[in-house]
Amino acid sequence: MPRPPRLHVPGGLYHIIMRGNGRQTIFFNDADRQYWQSLLATGIQRRGHRLHAYCWMSNHVHMMIQNHADPLAGFLGTLASSYARGTNRRLGRSGHLFERRYRAILIQQDAHALELVRYIHRNPVRSAMVADPADYPWSSHGAYLHGNAPGWLTTEWLLGLLGTALAGARRAYASFMAADADEAGRHALCNGRDDDPRILGDDQFARTACDQATPVGARQDLNELVRATCERYGVSDADLAVPSRNRLHARVRAEIARAAIDGRAATLTEVARRFGRSPSALCRRVSQLRRGRDSQ
Protein backbone atom coordinates (compact mmCIF):
# COMPACT_ATOMS: atom_id res chain seq x y z
CA MET A 1 0.00 0.00 0.00
CA PRO A 2 1.49 3.41 -0.96
CA ARG A 3 2.30 5.75 1.91
CA PRO A 4 -0.04 8.75 2.32
CA PRO A 5 1.34 12.10 1.16
CA ARG A 6 2.90 14.36 3.75
CA LEU A 7 0.67 17.00 5.30
CA HIS A 8 1.79 20.55 4.61
CA VAL A 9 -0.11 23.02 6.81
CA PRO A 10 1.38 26.55 6.69
CA GLY A 11 2.37 27.52 10.22
CA GLY A 12 2.01 23.93 11.43
CA LEU A 13 4.15 22.55 14.24
CA TYR A 14 5.97 19.29 13.42
CA HIS A 15 8.01 16.66 15.22
CA ILE A 16 10.78 15.75 12.80
CA ILE A 17 12.84 12.58 13.23
CA MET A 18 15.75 11.88 10.89
CA ARG A 19 17.71 8.63 11.35
CA GLY A 20 20.92 7.26 9.98
CA ASN A 21 20.47 4.67 7.24
CA GLY A 22 20.19 1.30 8.97
CA ARG A 23 20.52 3.16 12.31
CA GLN A 24 24.14 3.93 11.44
CA THR A 25 26.03 6.79 13.08
CA ILE A 26 25.58 10.19 11.46
CA PHE A 27 27.65 12.31 13.90
CA PHE A 28 31.16 10.99 14.49
CA ASN A 29 32.48 13.90 16.55
CA ASP A 30 31.58 17.35 17.83
CA ALA A 31 32.82 18.98 14.62
CA ASP A 32 30.18 17.02 12.69
CA ARG A 33 27.42 18.41 14.90
CA GLN A 34 28.79 21.91 14.49
CA TYR A 35 28.84 21.46 10.72
CA TRP A 36 25.23 20.22 10.84
CA GLN A 37 24.23 23.28 12.87
CA SER A 38 25.87 25.65 10.41
CA LEU A 39 23.90 24.13 7.54
CA LEU A 40 20.70 24.20 9.57
CA ALA A 41 21.21 27.86 10.51
CA THR A 42 21.55 28.81 6.84
CA GLY A 43 18.41 26.92 5.90
CA ILE A 44 16.35 28.39 8.75
CA GLN A 45 17.38 31.90 7.82
CA ARG A 46 16.69 31.48 4.13
CA ARG A 47 13.35 29.71 4.38
CA GLY A 48 11.82 31.34 7.44
CA HIS A 49 10.95 28.21 9.43
CA ARG A 50 11.15 28.30 13.23
CA LEU A 51 13.08 25.69 15.19
CA HIS A 52 11.69 25.43 18.74
CA ALA A 53 13.63 22.43 20.08
CA TYR A 54 16.30 19.95 18.98
CA CYS A 55 18.50 17.10 20.09
CA TRP A 56 21.40 15.70 18.04
CA MET A 57 21.93 12.07 19.04
CA SER A 58 24.68 9.90 17.53
CA ASN A 59 22.53 8.18 14.90
CA HIS A 60 19.40 10.32 14.71
CA VAL A 61 18.04 13.81 15.33
CA HIS A 62 14.83 15.20 16.81
CA MET A 63 13.48 18.64 15.97
CA MET A 64 10.31 20.56 16.71
CA ILE A 65 9.83 22.92 13.78
CA GLN A 66 7.09 25.36 12.86
CA ASN A 67 7.08 25.62 9.11
CA HIS A 68 6.72 28.80 7.09
CA ALA A 69 4.56 29.06 3.99
CA ASP A 70 6.50 26.47 2.01
CA PRO A 71 6.75 22.75 2.94
CA LEU A 72 9.53 21.46 5.18
CA ALA A 73 10.55 18.89 2.57
CA GLY A 74 12.78 21.31 0.66
CA PHE A 75 14.57 22.53 3.77
CA LEU A 76 15.07 19.07 5.27
CA GLY A 77 16.09 17.50 1.96
CA THR A 78 18.73 20.17 1.36
CA LEU A 79 19.98 19.93 4.95
CA ALA A 80 20.36 16.14 4.85
CA SER A 81 21.91 15.98 1.38
CA SER A 82 24.38 18.81 2.05
CA TYR A 83 25.48 17.25 5.33
CA ALA A 84 25.76 13.77 3.80
CA ARG A 85 27.89 15.02 0.89
CA GLY A 86 30.25 16.85 3.23
CA THR A 87 30.52 13.96 5.67
CA ASN A 88 31.02 11.33 2.96
CA ARG A 89 33.69 13.46 1.37
CA ARG A 90 35.52 13.82 4.69
CA LEU A 91 35.30 10.11 5.45
CA GLY A 92 36.08 8.98 1.91
CA ARG A 93 32.86 6.96 1.72
CA SER A 94 29.77 6.86 -0.48
CA GLY A 95 26.16 5.80 -0.17
CA HIS A 96 23.18 7.00 1.82
CA LEU A 97 23.87 8.46 5.25
CA PHE A 98 20.21 9.03 6.22
CA GLU A 99 17.11 6.90 5.81
CA ARG A 100 15.35 7.85 2.62
CA ARG A 101 12.21 9.06 4.38
CA TYR A 102 12.27 11.21 7.51
CA ARG A 103 9.30 11.19 9.88
CA ALA A 104 7.16 14.33 10.16
CA ILE A 105 4.27 14.41 12.64
CA LEU A 106 1.96 17.45 12.67
CA ILE A 107 1.13 18.10 16.32
CA GLN A 108 -1.70 19.92 18.05
CA GLN A 109 0.16 22.78 19.65
CA ASP A 110 -1.87 23.49 22.78
CA ALA A 111 -2.13 19.80 23.69
CA HIS A 112 1.31 18.41 22.88
CA ALA A 113 3.95 21.14 22.37
CA LEU A 114 5.33 21.08 25.90
CA GLU A 115 5.28 17.29 26.09
CA LEU A 116 7.20 17.12 22.83
CA VAL A 117 9.91 19.49 24.07
CA ARG A 118 10.31 17.36 27.19
CA TYR A 119 10.48 14.21 25.09
CA ILE A 120 13.15 15.70 22.81
CA HIS A 121 15.31 17.07 25.63
CA ARG A 122 15.14 13.90 27.73
CA ASN A 123 16.19 11.65 24.85
CA PRO A 124 19.82 11.37 26.07
CA VAL A 125 18.58 10.44 29.57
CA ARG A 126 16.37 7.64 28.25
CA SER A 127 19.34 6.40 26.21
CA ALA A 128 21.45 6.28 29.41
CA MET A 129 23.98 8.71 27.96
CA VAL A 130 23.57 11.19 30.83
CA ALA A 131 21.69 11.31 34.13
CA ASP A 132 20.44 14.87 33.62
CA PRO A 133 19.46 16.51 30.30
CA ALA A 134 21.55 19.51 31.36
CA ASP A 135 24.64 17.33 31.02
CA TYR A 136 24.06 16.75 27.30
CA PRO A 137 25.48 19.65 25.28
CA TRP A 138 23.82 18.89 21.93
CA SER A 139 20.22 19.81 22.64
CA SER A 140 18.29 23.04 23.15
CA HIS A 141 17.65 22.23 26.84
CA GLY A 142 20.39 24.58 28.07
CA ALA A 143 18.99 27.50 26.07
CA TYR A 144 15.63 27.05 27.79
CA LEU A 145 17.23 26.90 31.23
CA HIS A 146 19.82 29.65 30.92
CA GLY A 147 19.22 31.63 27.74
CA ASN A 148 21.90 32.48 25.15
CA ALA A 149 19.98 30.69 22.39
CA PRO A 150 21.60 30.82 18.93
CA GLY A 151 19.83 32.93 16.35
CA TRP A 152 18.37 29.89 14.61
CA LEU A 153 16.57 28.66 17.76
CA THR A 154 13.31 30.16 19.06
CA THR A 155 12.60 29.68 22.79
CA GLU A 156 10.30 32.61 23.58
CA TRP A 157 7.06 31.00 22.42
CA LEU A 158 7.33 27.85 24.52
CA LEU A 159 8.59 29.68 27.61
CA GLY A 160 5.62 31.99 27.17
CA LEU A 161 3.33 29.01 27.65
CA LEU A 162 4.84 28.54 31.12
CA GLY A 163 4.71 32.11 32.38
CA THR A 164 4.79 35.78 31.46
CA ALA A 165 7.95 36.56 33.45
CA LEU A 166 11.07 34.98 31.97
CA ALA A 167 12.63 33.90 35.27
CA GLY A 168 9.40 32.28 36.42
CA ALA A 169 8.90 30.57 33.07
CA ARG A 170 12.39 29.06 33.29
CA ARG A 171 11.74 27.78 36.80
CA ALA A 172 8.47 26.23 35.61
CA TYR A 173 10.29 24.68 32.67
CA ALA A 174 12.94 23.13 34.97
CA SER A 175 10.22 21.69 37.19
CA PHE A 176 8.31 20.32 34.20
CA MET A 177 11.45 18.65 32.86
CA ALA A 178 12.09 16.79 36.10
CA ALA A 179 9.68 13.99 35.16
CA ASP A 180 9.34 12.19 31.85
CA ALA A 181 6.14 11.34 30.01
CA ASP A 182 4.68 7.84 30.32
CA GLU A 183 5.41 5.17 27.73
CA ALA A 184 2.10 5.61 25.91
CA GLY A 185 2.67 9.35 25.63
CA ARG A 186 6.19 8.87 24.29
CA HIS A 187 4.92 6.37 21.73
CA ALA A 188 2.32 8.83 20.44
CA LEU A 189 4.86 11.64 20.15
CA CYS A 190 6.94 9.50 17.77
CA ASN A 191 4.17 7.61 15.96
CA GLY A 192 1.16 9.92 15.78
CA ARG A 193 -2.43 8.73 15.86
CA ASP A 194 -3.33 5.09 15.40
CA ASP A 195 -5.51 6.00 12.40
CA ASP A 196 -3.10 8.54 10.89
CA PRO A 197 0.60 8.49 11.88
CA ARG A 198 1.09 11.89 10.24
CA ILE A 199 -0.91 13.66 12.97
CA LEU A 200 -0.95 13.90 16.77
CA GLY A 201 -4.08 15.58 18.08
CA ASP A 202 -7.77 15.12 18.73
CA ASP A 203 -10.38 14.25 16.09
CA GLN A 204 -11.27 17.87 15.36
CA PHE A 205 -7.62 18.82 14.91
CA ALA A 206 -7.07 15.86 12.57
CA ARG A 207 -10.09 16.79 10.43
CA THR A 208 -9.06 20.42 10.23
CA ALA A 209 -5.45 19.56 9.40
CA CYS A 210 -6.47 17.30 6.53
CA ASP A 211 -8.87 19.96 5.20
CA GLN A 212 -6.25 22.71 5.35
CA ALA A 213 -3.30 20.70 4.09
CA THR A 214 -1.72 21.59 0.77
CA PRO A 215 -0.39 18.61 -1.19
CA VAL A 216 3.39 18.91 -1.39
CA GLY A 217 4.28 20.02 -4.89
CA ALA A 218 0.90 21.58 -5.57
CA ARG A 219 0.55 25.24 -6.50
CA GLN A 220 0.13 27.29 -3.35
CA ASP A 221 -2.43 30.04 -2.92
CA LEU A 222 -0.92 33.53 -2.78
CA ASN A 223 -3.62 34.87 -0.45
CA GLU A 224 -2.98 32.11 2.07
CA LEU A 225 0.77 32.61 1.77
CA VAL A 226 0.41 36.35 2.48
CA ARG A 227 -1.93 35.67 5.42
CA ALA A 228 0.39 33.10 7.02
CA THR A 229 3.51 35.24 6.59
CA CYS A 230 1.84 38.39 7.92
CA GLU A 231 0.57 36.47 10.93
CA ARG A 232 4.05 35.12 11.61
CA TYR A 233 5.61 38.60 11.61
CA GLY A 234 2.71 40.42 13.27
CA VAL A 235 1.96 42.75 10.35
CA SER A 236 -1.04 43.20 8.08
CA ASP A 237 -1.49 42.86 4.34
CA ALA A 238 -2.24 46.59 4.20
CA ASP A 239 1.04 47.41 5.99
CA LEU A 240 2.99 45.84 3.13
CA ALA A 241 1.35 48.09 0.54
CA VAL A 242 2.21 51.33 2.35
CA PRO A 243 4.98 53.27 0.54
CA SER A 244 7.65 53.37 3.26
CA ARG A 245 11.20 52.17 3.94
CA ASN A 246 10.20 50.03 6.93
CA ARG A 247 12.81 47.23 7.12
CA LEU A 248 10.44 44.69 8.64
CA HIS A 249 7.88 45.24 5.88
CA ALA A 250 10.61 44.91 3.25
CA ARG A 251 11.72 41.64 4.83
CA VAL A 252 8.15 40.27 4.87
CA ARG A 253 7.57 41.21 1.23
CA ALA A 254 10.79 39.42 0.28
CA GLU A 255 9.75 36.33 2.29
CA ILE A 256 6.41 36.26 0.51
CA ALA A 257 7.98 36.71 -2.92
CA ARG A 258 10.54 33.96 -2.34
CA ALA A 259 7.91 31.52 -1.07
CA ALA A 260 5.50 32.45 -3.87
CA ILE A 261 8.13 31.72 -6.51
CA ASP A 262 9.27 28.48 -4.86
CA GLY A 263 5.70 27.30 -4.27
CA ARG A 264 4.46 28.42 -7.68
CA ALA A 265 1.85 30.68 -6.09
CA ALA A 266 2.78 33.73 -8.18
CA THR A 267 5.55 35.32 -10.17
CA LEU A 268 7.79 37.99 -8.70
CA THR A 269 6.09 40.57 -10.91
CA GLU A 270 2.67 39.56 -9.57
CA VAL A 271 3.83 39.89 -5.97
CA ALA A 272 5.45 43.27 -6.70
CA ARG A 273 2.23 44.49 -8.32
CA ARG A 274 0.17 43.35 -5.33
CA PHE A 275 2.23 45.48 -2.92
CA GLY A 276 2.88 48.39 -5.27
CA ARG A 277 6.60 47.74 -5.50
CA SER A 278 9.14 47.71 -8.30
CA PRO A 279 9.87 44.16 -9.53
CA SER A 280 13.58 44.96 -9.78
CA ALA A 281 13.73 46.26 -6.18
CA LEU A 282 11.81 43.25 -4.89
CA CYS A 283 14.10 40.96 -6.88
CA ARG A 284 17.13 42.45 -5.09
CA ARG A 285 15.48 41.85 -1.72
CA VAL A 286 14.74 38.23 -2.59
CA SER A 287 18.32 37.71 -3.77
CA GLN A 288 19.61 39.10 -0.47
CA LEU A 289 17.29 36.76 1.40
CA ARG A 290 18.47 33.71 -0.55
CA ARG A 291 22.07 34.61 0.21
CA GLY A 292 21.22 34.65 3.90
CA ARG A 293 21.24 38.41 4.33
CA ASP A 294 18.43 40.38 5.91
CA SER A 295 16.87 43.14 3.83
CA GLN A 296 18.84 46.34 3.98
Image (cartoon, rainbow, N blue to C red):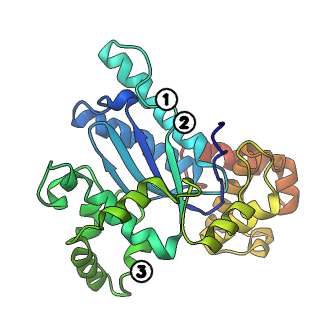
Secondary element at tag 3: loop
Query: In 3D space, how far apart are the residues under numbered discs 1 and 3 (Cα atoms)?
Result: 35 Å
Left or right, 167 with reference to 266: left
Q: Is residue 191 above or below residue 86?
A: below
Q: Where is residue 240 drawn, in percent x and y?
A: 75, 68
Q: Badge 3, how many Cα within 10 Å: few under 14, some, many 20+?
A: some
- Checking the image for residue 161, the label placed there is 3
Tags 1 and 2 in contact by the CB under 8 Å rule? yes
Q: Which residue is mark 1?
A: 81
Regarding residue 94, the answer to whether it shows in the image is yes
Amino acid identity at mark 2:
Gly
Identify which residue is drawn at 38% across, 57% down: 187
Q: Earlier in the sequence, mark 1 or mark 3?
A: 1
Query: In 3D space, how far apart are the residues under numbered discs 2 and 3 (Cα atoms)?
Result: 31 Å
Identify which residue is drawn at 48% across, 37% down: 79
Q: Which residue is mark 2?
A: 77
Query: In 3D space, how far apart are the residues under numbered discs 1 and 2 (Cα atoms)?
Result: 6 Å
Left or right, 127 with reference to 239: left
Q: Where is residue 62 drawn, in percent x and y?
A: 38, 50
